Amino acid sequence: ALAVLRHGFKDGNARFQMCQFAPSHDFNPDLRAMYEQVRCRVVRQLHYSPFLRDGKPIEKSIDVVLFVNGIPVATIELKTDFTQSIHDAIRQYRHDRLPRDSDTKQEEPLLGFGRRALVHFAVSTDVVYMTTRLRGAETEFLPFNLGDQGGASNPANPSGYRTAYLWERVLERTAWLDILGRFLNQEKKGTPLERLVFPRFHQWDVVNRIEASVRSEGPGRKYLIQHSAGSGKSNSIAWLAHRLSTLYALAYGTAGKEDAECKVFDSVIVVTDRTVLDKQLQETIYQIEHKIGVVTPITDEGVKSQQLVAALAQKKPIIIVTI
């Protein structure tokens, strides 16, 4: 589903484009017009199973399903903490939302891994959890919360539910299409697809905050991102590097008058002590851009300096070099 949304598909000699994500700049007004036409829909209480039992449709439904141009991209089970808890939603996904029908043993199209819905949210009035792969009782859920004073969960919200950020910020049209277009990451070790990475809230938040800061303050600032062990540093680096390498912002003339949109950075340099990051960066960015050569690795011992000079002179978009 993600590949079809990002890159369309071919049938014979015809190519079909299924979605236009937000362009990095407005040099081509046609792309902006196509982006504005993308249709995002919310369907409540969706009956999703195509199978029959004793000749009658099987009654299976999910609280909320999100669609982009007719393609289902997310499911949501909702619980109120006054009567139930987040664990009830998780239990429902693990035992009632099976990727294969228990009678026919056939794959449920909506719930099959990576084929339709790309992420599944368990949401209560207090907390949010999510998974990209339903495996029955073995399904693993990750928290998708803001954190509360250095701890887990979400802070009190004086104007509504603690989890209001999910629909007010994350599922807001512009933000949601941006996640589908430039964050979700497929990991393959051969075929088939093994893992689908949906950004954790802290990863999504930090990339957007730094982009907003650069847009308003310009380049030349220093930032520190603190990531705990196992919290997705490599993906945060990949998403941020790609975002900065494609960032356009309004330039200002000497009189303070706005000029045209300009590319903010000629190159983004990633300095790391992890050689595995090179391959991961290239794979992640290739999925977003579908272009080869966006990432230039500086790998040859003894001539790194010369390689780095050449890459900078050629204004390679993303340059990655080990210490």
Image: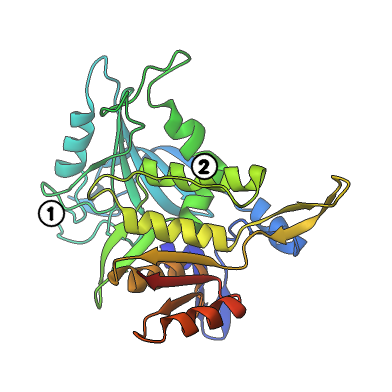
Helix, strand or loop status at disc 2: helix
Q: Quadrant location of residue 22? A: bottom right
Labels 1 & 2 near each other (Cβ < 8 A):
no
- What x and y, as percent, mark residue 141? 22, 43
Q: Position of residue 101 (x, y in %)?
A: 18, 54
User: Is 308 left, or right, of 162 in this rendering?
Assistant: right
The answer to whether 123 appears left or right of 307 in the picture is left
Please state which amino acid type lies under the numbered disc 1. Asp
In this rendering, which labeled residue sits more in front, label 1 or label 2? 2
Few, some or many C-alpha atoms within 10 Å of disc 2 (few <14, some 14-19, many ≥20)?
Answer: few
Evaluate whether residue 271 shows in this view.
yes
Residue appearing at x 51%, y 75% in the figure: 294
Looking at the picture, which amino acid does disc 2 mark? Arg
The picture places residue 110, in percent across and down from the top left corner, at 33, 54
Camera-side residue of 253 and 242: 253
Q: Which residue is mark 1?
A: 103
Farthest residue in the left direction?
137
**Viewer can see residue 110:** no
Mark on residue 209? 2
Are there few (<14), some (14-19), or many (20+) residues within 10 Å of tag 1? few
The residues tagged by marks 1 and 2 sit, at their Cα atoms, a distance apart of 48 Å
Please name whichever residue, 167 or 300, is drawn nearer the observer in this view of the structure: 300
The quadrant of the image that shows the N terminus is bottom left
142 to the left or right of 320: left
Query: In the figure, is residue 51 to the left or right of 286?
Result: left
> In front here: 254 or 50?
254
